[in-house]
Amino acid sequence: MNKTMDSILDSLPAITEGIQNIREILLANAVMFGEIPGPTGQEGARVRFMKDRFHECGCQSICEDEAGNAIAMLPGKKGNRTILVSAHLDTPFFGAVDHTVTVHTDRLEGPGILDNSIGLAAVASLPIILEKLGIELDDNLILMASAKSLGEGNIAGMRFFLENNKVPIRAGILVEGGTLGRLSYASLGMLRGNITCRMPEDYNYMRHGSAGAIPVLNTIIRRLLEIPIPQEPPTHLIMGQVKAGTSYNTAATSGALHFEVRSEQAGMVDAIEKQVKNIVGEVAFSSGFQLELIAAARRMNGSIGYNHPLVESMRAIMERLAVRPSISPSTGELAALIHNHIPGITIGLTRGSKRHELNETADIESMWTGLTNIIGLLQAIDGGFCDEES
Amino acid sequence: MKNLENWIKNNTFHHSQFFDQRELLRQKEKVGASISLCIPTLNEEATIGKEIVIFRSELMERYPLVDEIAVIDSGSTDKTLEVAASFGAHTYFAGDILPEEGHKRGKGENLWKAIYQLKGDIICYVDADIKNIHPRFCYGLVAPLLYRENMHYVKAFYDRPLAFSQGIRPSGGGRVTEILVRPLFSLFYPELTGLIQPLSGEYAVRRKVLERLPFPIGYGVETSHILDVYHEWGLDAFGQTDLDQRVHRNQATTSLGKMSFGILQSFLGRMEKLGMPGQLPEMSSILRQFQAKDNEYLQVEHEIIEEERPPMIEIEGYREKFGI
């Protein structure tokens, strides 16, 4: 008998209950991923672990591609169409950080546990959870742990996969550990830039003074703050990191400013980038320093729309699970899906706190609802309730 | 010591030899053994949750190698039992097991009462304070017992750094092992020096052996087990598995002093029981330590002869000089 969307919604409480009965599977995977360091560009150990998990649950076509993604296929009953489920591998923590995860009765705690050990655990656990719940999809699933997502990684793993993938993808679900209720169906326009500042060998102290790179960076920051930033549509200029200097009594000869511009308005990021370029050029001339603006990562604005059946289905599932959707655009892999005309959303699995701190936490109880979201949506996509009418 | 070299070669394993848990499961079914995992605890709320979650997921849900997981507690005042129970472990207060035998407070008491409480043909003991817990801490120890019928007691050893600049690196146990136990074994039981970490808290043992062993309730339990198993079943009853690194709390020197005191009590007690005081065997002058090269463990023998000088006053030249 063909499923209806109502029957999928009605089955959600039983799915949650079933997941809770095998909760150790997800929790153990989250702990084990969490304890493997995965700084951007050094995700190899996590890839090996993910591939082992794929092997153990009978996936097919398991591989690590050229970009360092771990990928596997879970064949569907019919296998006519394919759904992508992906979580990013990397974390902002260096390998030398103590990655021990602690399991409390109500939460997991450790660096990167929310972003994105829980997401990886969900992808790794999905085949065994579907099997234990007795859910067989008609569609194939491509399960993926994508590399080089964060910061200067510039979602390189997902971009490589989509540029080289030969299998048409019906829809994509991108899994983030946090936060339950997160629903992203649009990608923000975004630019991550580095302004580097270096004193040239023939620097003219008589003309420009001897205060060094820090005042130069200060001038740039002051000028960037003067750029008019519209409040609507929401646009932000974030200055995330400044690096310069070595001691109290030596003028810094080099430095760098890392910033991000993001906007929901198409074209706004490009407009601001032009102004930043002008500022960098002017300050380079007046300071005598060598200044360079390097784009580390870039996203285009895009959206599948609030009324896309994929988004509508997700909202219906969340409503049935009493989860209030928190709709916000993404700067992650979703941009690559939308750019490749693949309907996709990013969702969060659980609640948590202290994101990107060493004692980051992920609540256990809300994970089951988050996983139910994914399984409910997979069934909806599989049942044809998320396709746009052509 | 050819016998010892052969033992090290044949009875020393690495957990990676048993990574295929499907195969292990087939072997378990073939030999028809049941396996219990016992975690003795006292105030371990920080680490017990993770151990239970990992063991249940990997050794029960995915591959049902272990038939039961039990926490036997000495009387924790923190949330150890609450955390363990919340993740599905069977939890027991040691005092409630065999109450007619009374309750003594100590790790050995928990291990001893586990034999009564648990059902397995093989019991694997794993300490609760391991920060980097992994299923290998259980299957690496149980596996040799599934494949080697004549092996009864498999101990863990740890700490092989992946990178070591000299190619050859010192390898061995903790401070108490290297300072107390290895010298004692080298003096009186040279064959037992093949055990790289005789004091490790992780080991798997057949019930038919455990039920015949007396259990010191304190620090001496591991040492006395080794002596008793050696006397009753011989060196071949032992196996040891390299479990790579074990991250745990570092103990203060004063705690190690207490541990050493307990171990000495047990060791001397065993010697007395065996009628050895007064007729001590000839003491060996060879201290055996370990070094590791690649995956090989080599014994390094140091001849240490503690020569002794007489009191100076007994020396003729001294007496002459000072007119004594």
Image: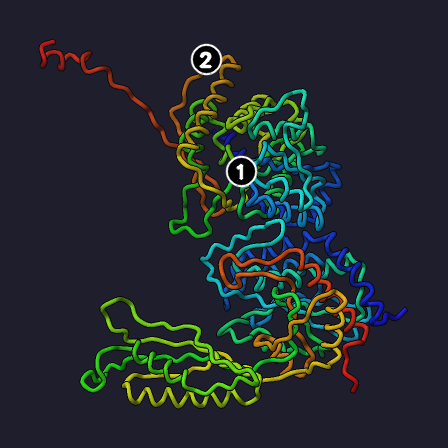
* SS at mark 2 in the image: loop
Residue B150, quarter of the rendered image: top right
* SS at mark 1 in the image: helix
A148 sits left or right of B139 in the view = left
Could you tell me if residue B11 is visible in this image?
no
Question: Foreground: B295 or B217?
Answer: B217
Coordinates of residue A7 in the picture (x, y in percent): 85, 67
Could you tell me if residue A81 is visible in this image?
yes
Residue at horizontal 59 percent and vertical 61 percent from the top: A352
Q: Which residue carries the number 1 mark?
A: B9
Which of discs 2 and 1 lies nearer the camera? The answer is 2
A375 sits left or right of A281 in the view = right
Disc 2 to disc 1, C-alpha distance = 33 Å
Coordinates of residue A29 in the picture (x, y in percent): 63, 56
Q: Quadrant of the C terminus of chain B?
A: top left
Residue B277 circle label:
2
Residue at horizontal 51 percent and vertical 26 percent from the top: B220
